[in-house]
Image (cartoon, helix red, strand yellow):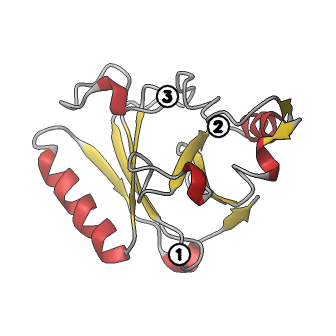
Amino acid sequence: MYCLNQDLTRTRRTYRPLLPTLPSICVIWVPSVFQRRELGLGRFFPVILETDAEEEEFEALLAAPRSAPVPPNFLNLRASQLVASSATLATYFAPEPGWPHILLLHAPIESTWNADPSHFMRQSYIVDMFATEAALAHAAAEMTAAAGDVPVTVVTLNRSWLSWGSA
């Protein structure tokens, strides 16, 4: 039998938010045999974890025996349970060298961001990954400017406050 946590998802980090209205993001460093262009920076797969119970459920799903590898997108297909009354743009810094910096957009489900609905994870999130803090800052500034008249709360986490979880 095959378990995802012994191969495909063995190397992963959980990026923790500082605000309870934001999710944790488990980032999986996908082994080279499974890497593809559609992944973040070609090698990272994000999973939105909104609660501690979801995190426990996700770990159990990764440990479950399977006949073959499957994409670990179990939770990303669910609707968000964290209700956003307005758009929030949040930065998550890389926990260590080689890992991505993340820009997360959490938008109300009914909002129109001129984005293809297929780009949203859990119907509410867009996750972009960047190799450098400078690229992250540039993208955050561009997305904020592109919002125009749409109110956006920007959450930029101070590095001295960071708390990282590791799977």
Q: Mark 3 highlights which residue?
A: 122
- Residue 155, percent from left and from top: 40, 58
> What amino acid type should be assigned to the residue bearing mark 3?
Arg
In the picture of the structure, the residue carrying the numbered disc 2 is 72
Q: Dot 1: few (<14), some (14–19), or many (≥20) neighbours within 10 Å?
A: few
Alpha carbon separation for disc pair 3 and 2: 14 Å
Q: Position of residue 11 (x, y in %)?
A: 70, 61
Q: In the shown orientation, is residue 38 left or right of residue 95?
A: left
**158 is higher (above) or lower (below) than 92:** below
* Relative depth, front residue between 131 and 52: 131
The answer to which of marks 1 and 3 sits earlier in the sequence is 1
Residue under label 1: 98
- Circle 3 crowding by C-alpha within 10 Å: few under 14, some 14–19, many from 20: some
Q: Amino acid at mark 2?
A: Pro
Left or right for 25, reference 112: right
Q: Quarter holding the N terminus?
A: top right
Residue type marked 1 = Gly
| Tag 3–tag 2 contact (CB < 8 Å) | no
Q: Nearer the viewer, mark 3 or mark 2?
A: 2
- Viewer-proximal residue among 120 and 45: 45
Helix, strand, or loop for circle 3?
A: loop
Quarter of the image holding residue 105?
A: top left
Counting other residues with Cα less than 10 Å from the Cα at mark 2, is it few (<14), some (14-19), or many (20 or more)?
A: some
